[in-house]
Image (cartoon, helix red, strand yellow):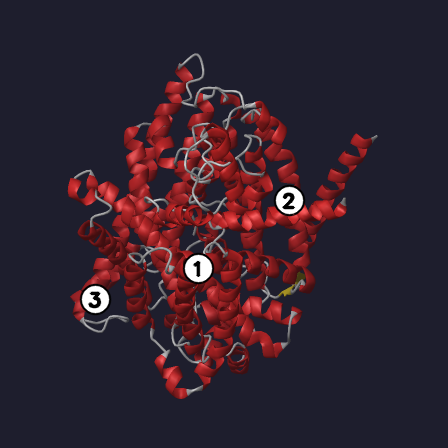
């Protein structure tokens, strides 16, 4: 009887989800309430978790509750600590959630909310969460080793090196695109620049306070820091109003770029307790708090979605980024559906703390479902804006011009209702001089969040506060990522260079680490600068490159998972990872190919270079270049981007070849050939503790 | 009964927040050292906290957060 009730419950839940999807799909032409998207998403997640992840756990991977885990085997009370699964879930989710799932869906919204929503749901259930779960499982069974090590042992030494090499370039592109988001949000905005700049002394104060006065008092120091942050948002308003102060904190995109590059260099060589650690406390707690707050806001307010389900830009002519729905939607949405970066997290800290192998399902699959939900909320925030405002904020100046009138003229031609008053009113509401061409996702999300949150707390008068709060929240964790990423990139580089020059390997040598830091900073700084001066907004070039890099890593991780399934002799279940791997490979390779060879200069790098070369031959100067020398620079950038994209393709193809070889070897063997840590029983007390 | 449960949830929530910034339970560490490495020096709470901070941020090329 009980059983019957359970099944009836799941049936009802599935029907509810299907009905919500039906409302969204059939209700064309009228605006739909966001609550339907939330209901559809939650039902899909619950059903997928209950059935598909259980199928993977019990039938495909055969998780063994009695098997030893690294947390018990190597317990040291520090890195290896058996941890309650709910506690660990929070840790894992905080590590995987970042700017990616927020920005991707906002940019993808130019095609309407429907394509992104469908991919966010289907992608997470069949690809993203599967990848996170299986990588976590693989690493847990192999003494919590890292992705590079896992590839080395399951696929071979060479593919392991190739993957590490690829990971370094992903890091550069990631840091460049994250910094670009900050530059786009802060350019010519004294209020925003002041509050973000204020985080540096605030964090340093927290660092000194907790180092010398109150060590270990994390909660106390974080609360003090949070109070100071709120004060800095309020003070920012007065900075903006005062001409002298406003001039001091008003910087152009190019100036901000140099400031960020300098900041990245200095911050990553400072002692960690001074700046990085305290700011990480603020950014981590603020991130979790804001995500919860946004979820509550979306559910309570459940805004109307003003963006159409599908726009005319599904044909690839969109202003925000160019390219057809296939393959570019999939590399643009990226993180919220499947993110390759998670395979680095799932094979690092988390498996060292997992108490029981069976927890991998809740932590790996579950946390990724949460991340997808964050992406859905970002999509809702973007789609609840007037489409006219959305396109004003996200179209590059080269297309809509720099004044409200020129923007209105172009955007009305696309068929979206917009007036100059709407643009100036929105800018005034959020306390900014202009909202035109603020691509990059953060400002759009901030306006969307400000509209939602100001309806919960405050009124239109509070919108400016919420807008700058949202900008601060994103800038805070992006700057932390820039700082931590530059450090990590420096160590990666020293490792790689150390293979050829032993002197570079010494991580405690000051010259070696300064050189490596310098190389790392100039690497991402180069792409950042190129993005900032691009008249098409930079996001147009850098975000697809980032998406391709990220999906490339996902492809590599899924190949690893596939090889392991074959080595475990679970051939008949290999489709669980083969299908997502094939899809990710198809999208990523197609996107990379088009980025290089497409004959539209807005998509293909080579076509873009050719356009400039032809102009140079005719001795004409094309914007943004102001001289023939700058034209040469643009052409050179195109070739650099081409080479990088080609490198990503080469990494993907070579890993595929090594993967197929490993699979064939595994199939020829008569018995399992996995390289798992030898089987041991979990100690009795561990089973009782559970 | 309900109080107890709320207490436990609160405690786990706090644990999770601390773990997010790389600080596991100090009491678990002390207990582990007492049981498994009897007689070895145990770090003070402060030393433990510093050691964890260095391990998280000083990292050896480890990226412990995502995009």
Task: Identify the element where label 1 is drawn.
Answer: helix
Look at the image and tell me whether residue A312 can be seen. no
Q: How far apart are marks 3 and 1 (CA)?
A: 51 Å
Compared to residue A644, the image places residue A261 above or below, namely below
Q: Mark 1 points at which residue?
A: A210
Which residue appears at 53% of the width and 39% of the height? B28
Q: How far apart are marks 1 and 2 (CA)?
A: 44 Å
Q: Mark 3 points at which residue?
A: A631
Residue B16 lies, in percent from the top left, at 55, 47
Q: Residue furthest right?
A: A1
Left or right: residue A315 compared with residue A606: right
Residue A408 lies, in percent from the top left, at 49, 77
Q: Which chain carries label 3?
A: A
Proximity of marks 3 and 2: CB atoms separated by less than 8 Å: no
Residue A201 lies, in percent from the top left, at 39, 69
Q: In which quarter of the image is residue A534?
A: bottom left
Q: Mark 1 lies on which chain?
A: A
Residue A32 lies, in percent from the top left, at 67, 61
Q: Earlier in the sequence, mark 3 or mark 2?
A: 2
Q: Mark 2 points at which residue?
A: A44
Q: Quadrant of residue A378?
A: bottom right
Q: Which of marks 3 and 1 is in front?
A: 1
Q: Within 10 angstroms of label 3, few (less than 14), some, or many (20 or more) residues?
A: many
Q: Residue furthest front?
A: B39
Compared to residue B54, the image places residue A582 above or below, namely above
Task: Give whichever of A349, A398 is nearer the camera.
Answer: A349
Task: Identify the element where label 3 is drawn.
Answer: helix
Q: Residue furthest bottom?
A: A243
């Amino acid at each position: 009887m009980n059983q019957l009730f359970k099944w009836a419950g799941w049936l009802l839940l599935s029907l509810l989800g299907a009905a919500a999807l039906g409302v969204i799909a059939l209700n064309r032409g009228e605006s739909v309430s966001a609550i339907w998207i939330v209901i559809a998403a939650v039902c899909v997640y619950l059903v997928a978790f209950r059935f598909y992840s259980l199928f993977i756990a019990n039938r495909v991977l055969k998780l063994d509750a009695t098997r030893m885990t690294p947390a018990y085997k190597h317990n040291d009370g520090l890195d290896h600590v058996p941890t309650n699964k709910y506690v660990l879930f929070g840790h894992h989710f905080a590590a995987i959630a970042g700017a990616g799932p927020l920005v991707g869906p906002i940019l993808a919204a130019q095609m309407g909310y429907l394509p992104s929503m469908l991919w966010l749901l289907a992608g997470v259930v069949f690809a993203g969460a599967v990848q996170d779960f299986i990588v976590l499982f693989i690493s847990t069974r192999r003494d919590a080793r890292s992705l590079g090590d896992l590839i080395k042992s399951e696929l071979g030494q060479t593919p392991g090196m190739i993957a590490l090499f690829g990971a370094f370039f992903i890091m550069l592109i990631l840091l460049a695109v994250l910094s670009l988001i900050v530059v786009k949000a802060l350019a010519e905005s004294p209020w925003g620049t002041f509050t973000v700049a204020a985080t540096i002394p605030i964090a340093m104060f927290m660092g000194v306070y907790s180092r010398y006065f109150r060590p270990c008092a994390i909660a106390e120091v974080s609360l003090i820091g949070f109070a100071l942050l709120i004060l800095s948002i309020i003070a920012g308003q007065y900075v903006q109003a005062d001409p002298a102060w406003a001039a001091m904190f008003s910087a152009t995109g190019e100036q901000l770029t140099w400031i960020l590059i300098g900041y990245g260099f200095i911050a990553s060589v400072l002692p960690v307790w001074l700046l990085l650690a305290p700011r990480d406390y603020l950014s981590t707690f603020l991130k979790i708090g804001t995500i919860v707050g946004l979820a509550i806001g979306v559910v309570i307010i459940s805004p109307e979605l003003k963006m159409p389900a599908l726009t005319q830009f599904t044909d690839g002519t969109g202003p925000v980024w160019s390219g057809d729905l296939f393959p570019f939607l999939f590399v643009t949405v990226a993180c919220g559906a499947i993110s390759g970066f998670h395979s680095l997290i799932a094979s690092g800290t988390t498996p060292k703390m997992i108490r029981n192998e069976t927890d991998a399902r809740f932590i790996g699959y579950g946390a990724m479902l949460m991340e997808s939900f964050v992406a859905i909320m970002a999509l809702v925030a973007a789609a609840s804006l007037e489409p006219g405002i959305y396109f004003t904020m996200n179209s590059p100046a080269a297309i809509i011009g720099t004044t409200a009138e020129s923007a209105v003229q172009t955007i009305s031609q696309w068929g979206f209702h917009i007036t100059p008053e709407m643009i100036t009113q929105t800018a005034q509401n959020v306390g900014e001089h202009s909202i035109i061409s603020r691509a990059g996702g953060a400002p759009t999300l901030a306006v969307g969040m400000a509209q939602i949150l100001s309806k919960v707390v405050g009124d239109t008068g509070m919108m400016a506060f919420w807008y700058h709060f949202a900008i601060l929240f994103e800038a805070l964790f992006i700057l932390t990522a820039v700082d931590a990423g530059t450090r990590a990139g420096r160590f990666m580089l020293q490792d790689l260079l150390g293979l050829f020059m032993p002197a570079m390997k010494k991580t405690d040598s000051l010259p070696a680490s300064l050189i490596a830091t310098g190389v790392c900073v100039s690497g991402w700084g180069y792409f950042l600068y190129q993005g900032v001066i691009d008249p098409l907004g930079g996001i147009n070039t850098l975000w697809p490159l980032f998406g391709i890099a990220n999906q490339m890593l996902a492809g590599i991780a899924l190949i690893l998972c596939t090889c392991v399934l074959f080595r475990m002799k679970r051939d008949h279940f290999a489709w669980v990872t083969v299908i997502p791997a094939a899809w990710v490979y198809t999208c990523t390779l197609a996107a990379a190919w088009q980025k290089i060879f497409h004959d539209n200069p807005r998509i293909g790098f080579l076509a873009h270079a050719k356009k400039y070369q032809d102009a140079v031959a005719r001795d004409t100067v094309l914007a943004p270049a102001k001289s023939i020398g700058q034209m040469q620079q643009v052409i050179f950038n195109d070739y650099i981007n081409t080479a990088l994209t080609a490198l990503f393709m080469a990494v993907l193809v070579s890993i595929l070849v090594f993967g197929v070889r490993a699979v064939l070897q595994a199939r020829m063997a008569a018995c399992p050939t996995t390289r798992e840590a030898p089987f041991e029983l979990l100690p009795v007390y561990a089973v009782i503790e559970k | 009964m309900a109080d107890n449960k709320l207490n436990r949830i609160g405690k786990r929530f706090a644990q999770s927040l601390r773990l997010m910034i790389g600080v596991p339970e100090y009491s678990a560490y002390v207990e582990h050292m007492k049981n498994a490495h009897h007689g070895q020096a145990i770090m003070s709470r402060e030393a433990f906290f510093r050691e964890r901070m260095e391990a998280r941020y000083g990292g050896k090329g480890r990226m412990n957060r995502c995009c």
